[in-house]
Image (spheres, rainbow, N blue to C red):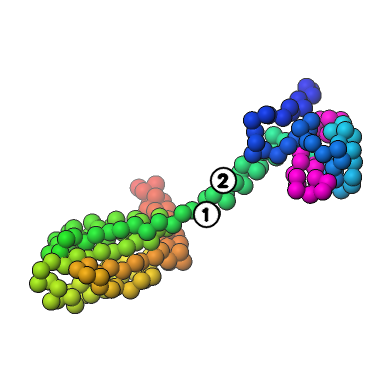
């Protein structure tokens, strides 16, 4: 079987840890390939140990004095670190506040309201908050209770996946509120949807 190539450090890989001949310290605190703490070792000896094991010497804690180095497969180590970074980025997904306008006045067709609520539902299921905006024109300001009633209907319609973060309030000729995704409710909705899809698929296969 061919011997694994000892990795040469890349000059332009500033974000990568120093490895092998690029490690600057004359003495390092060494951890071997079996995760045993060897202790303080001259850098030349540490690199030779890594070469003998057909692995790499990787500086995993450059801030220590002396730096901590491990003997390991750098290609595999780099792959595992990349996986962890992607997982962390996925966990820290940015939550945006999406705006859904209900029209320029209270006179909006129920069908158009349904379209906007479907849009709000999609945003909530994607994990975003939703700012609902209802505008008033002219004498509609004399009947603000109609706006409150519409907001209550929206809250009820989306209550299966959302919770009220900011209650309805007036700001000039606009009434606004903010709905936030309810993760527990969303999980239940998605689980029920998946179960129904599996049931439908099973029924289709029997036909």
Q: Which residues are magenta?
A: 50-70
- Is residue 52 a member of the stretch shown in magenta? yes
Q: Is residue 11 left or right of residue 105?
A: right
According to the picture, the residue beneath numbered tag 1 turns out to be: 92
Element under label 1? loop
User: Label 2 belongs to which residue?
Assistant: 86
Residue 5 at x, y percent in the picture: 76, 25
Looking at this view, is 104 or 121 the one in front? Answer: 104
Q: Residue at x 22, y 75 (%)?
A: 149
Question: What residue lies at 65% left-to-right and 36% top-to-bottom?
Answer: 14
Mark before the other along the chain sequence, 1 or 2: 2
Question: Of helix, strand and loop, which one carries label 2?
Answer: helix
Question: In the rendered image, which quarter is residue 97 located in?
Answer: bottom left
Whole-percent x, y for residue 159 in the image: 34, 69
In the current view of this chain or complex, which residue is farthest to the top? 2
> Disc 1, disc 2: CB below 8 Å?
no
Residue at 31% in and 69% down = 177
Name the spot of residue 195 as percent of width and height, x first. 43, 58
Is 33 above or below relative to 156? above
Residue 123 lies in the magenta-colored region: no
10 Å crowding of disc 1: few (<14), some (14-19), many (20+): few
Query: Can I make out residue 195 in this image?
Result: no
Q: Which residue corresponds to the image point at 68% horizontal and 29% vertical from the top-left?
A: 10
Name the side, left or right, on which 4 lies relative to 149: right
Count of labels in the image: 2
- State the residue in front, 130 or 10: 10
Q: Give neighbour class at mark 2: few <14, some 14-19, many 20+ (Cα, 10 Å).
A: few
């Amino acid at each position: 079987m061919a011997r694994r190539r000892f990795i040469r450090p890349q000059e332009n890989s500033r974000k990568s840890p120093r490895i092998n001949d690029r490690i600057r310290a004359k003495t390092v605190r060494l951890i071997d390939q079996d995760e045993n703490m060897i202790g303080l070792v001259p850098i030349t000896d540490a690199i030779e140990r890594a070469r003998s094991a057909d692995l790499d010497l990787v500086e995993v804690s450059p801030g220590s004095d002396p730096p901590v180095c491990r003997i390991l497969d750098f290609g595999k180590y780099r792959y595992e670190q990349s996986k962890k970074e992607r997982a962390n980025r996925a966990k820290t997904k940015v939550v945006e506040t999406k705006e859904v306008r209900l029209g320029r006045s209270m006179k909006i067709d129920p069908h158009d309201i349904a379209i906007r609520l479907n849009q709000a539902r999609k945003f909530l299921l994607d994990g975003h908050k939703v700012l609902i905006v209802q505008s008033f024109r002219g004498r509609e300001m004399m009947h603000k209770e109609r706006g409150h009633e519409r907001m209550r209907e929206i809250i009820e319609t989306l209550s299966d996946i959302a919770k009220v973060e900011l209650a309805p309030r007036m700001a000039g000729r606009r009434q606004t509120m903010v709905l936030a995704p309810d993760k527990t409710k969303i999980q239940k909705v998605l689980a029920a949807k998946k179960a129904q899809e599996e049931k439908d698929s099973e029924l289709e296969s029997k036909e």
